[in-house]
Image: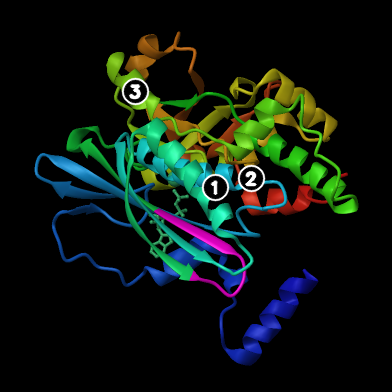
Amino acid sequence: MYEKRNKKSSEAKTGLTSLASLGEFGLIDRLTRNVKHFHPETLKGIGDDAAVIEAGDKVILLSTDLLVEGIHFDLTYVPFKHLGYKAAVVNFSDIAAMNGIPKQMTVSLAVSSRFSAEALDEIYAGILMACEKYKVDLVGGDTSSNVKGLMISVSIIGEAKKEEVTYRSGARSGDLLCVTGDLGSAFIGLLILEREKSVFKVDPNMQPELSGFDYQVGRQLKPEARTDIRNLLLGIGVRPTSMIDISDGLASEILHICKQSGVGCKLFEGKIPIDAHTRELAKEYKIIPSVAALSGGEDYELLFTIKQDDYEKIKDISEITIIGHMTASSEGKYMITPDGKSIPVTAQGWDGMKSSFQQLP
Ligand code: ADP
Ligand code: MG
């Protein structure tokens, strides 16, 4: 409250708007409010996981991400190779979220003199490992010196058939809400790494104690993109009505689908898939396990909706869990707890979670 008043009064004095008062999405909305398109081939611009551009009988999918040292990664515990791998994979995930296939990428680096060529070699070894696994061609980029720190920007091109593209806006009331894999482990992995970081700080010669947490730490440091889901769904004859990848946490992504599709939702807390060990660890950190899934982020699983008629086709697929359904917008956006309480779905957001738990022992 105090901070807010201060912000307001300083805004009143300068007549300028602070970025903090806008937030990330507010800023993007403001910067892009005058955008217009000149080409009919631009089927979808800003507002989804990737832009969609018509190209003959197919569409090109285009997305970009920027990773900044100290904001998106901490080199105290992120190995360079993992950083390269993750920078590539999070982009592949955006293409998977459009139901497309990632094909080509560019990589841009801004790097300070603090880094050696060998460190950057490692980043590229990670990037190329991801390219090999996902069969994506690295086709260009840009390289610059930087005053301080490291920044990596990756742009990705993907491909899909026009009728197969899944937008955030396609969900309808009655559709089933589904998620791949399990959620929350990447956030618990981050907490473990942050805890070990404080050990590092006290004694830089100490090795971090990460054994026994391989799954959670692996989910944080070396995520995978669910490019396999497209084929899985094709194989069982299910076309998602909407889709998004889970980078910011389940709650925030559900709200994106609700907003862009103009629907509400009923999410069942007890149905959210969470790894058993992650559940135990969450409790040790005094976090309700579903909160790690709802607000933690960085799991890079896919959240999608399907028509109710497809229930039989999907109900026995182990990689997919039905966690709720979409409702009319007027019914609101609610999560039902195992004891039957209705709680409004709100997005606490990744940054808030991260900073509030960074202080943990
Ligand atoms: P994601 O989490 O899937 O990477 P973002 O939340 O970063 O997506 O971005 C939301 C939408 O806003 C995307 O369509 C993205 O391309 C667009 N966007 C983000 N930043 C900018 C910017 N500076 N200028 C134009 N468009 C932007
Ligand atoms: Mg995305």
Front position among marks 1 and 2 = 1
Where is residue 196 drawn, in percent x and y? Answer: 81, 42
| Label 1 vs 2, first from the N-terminus | 2
Please, what secondary structure does the residue beneath circle 2 have? loop
Give the prevailing secondary structure in the magenta stretch: strand
Q: How is the image coloured?
A: rainbow
Where is residue 36 drawn, in percent x and y? Answer: 24, 68
In depth, the one of 79 and 29 nearer the eye is 79
Q: Quadrant of ligand 2?
A: top left
Where is residue 167 drawn, in percent x and y? Answer: 32, 41
Dot 2 amino acid type: Pro
Residue 60 is inside the magenta segment: no
Q: Is residue 350 above or below residue 152?
A: above
Dot 1 amino acid type: Glu
Q: Write the start and end of the magenta stretch as one range.
A: 145-154
In depth, the one of 1 and 122 nearer the eye is 122
**Few, some or many residues within 10 Å of mark 2 (<14, 14–19, 20+):** some
Q: What residue sits right under mark 2 in the picture? A: 79
Q: Is residue 289 visible?
A: yes
Q: Which mark is residue 291?
A: none
Location of residue 355 (image quadrant): bottom right
Q: Is residue 318 above or below residue 68?
A: above
Q: Residue at x 19, y 43 (%)?
A: 59
Q: Residue at x 63, y 26 (%)?
A: 269
Q: Would you say the beta carbon of the disc 3 residue lies within 8 angstroms of ligand 2?
A: no
Q: What residue sits right under mark 1 in the picture? A: 122
Q: Is residue 153 left or right of residue 159?
A: right
Where is residue 65 drawn, in percent x and y? Answer: 45, 54
Q: What residue sits right under mark 3 in the picture? A: 307
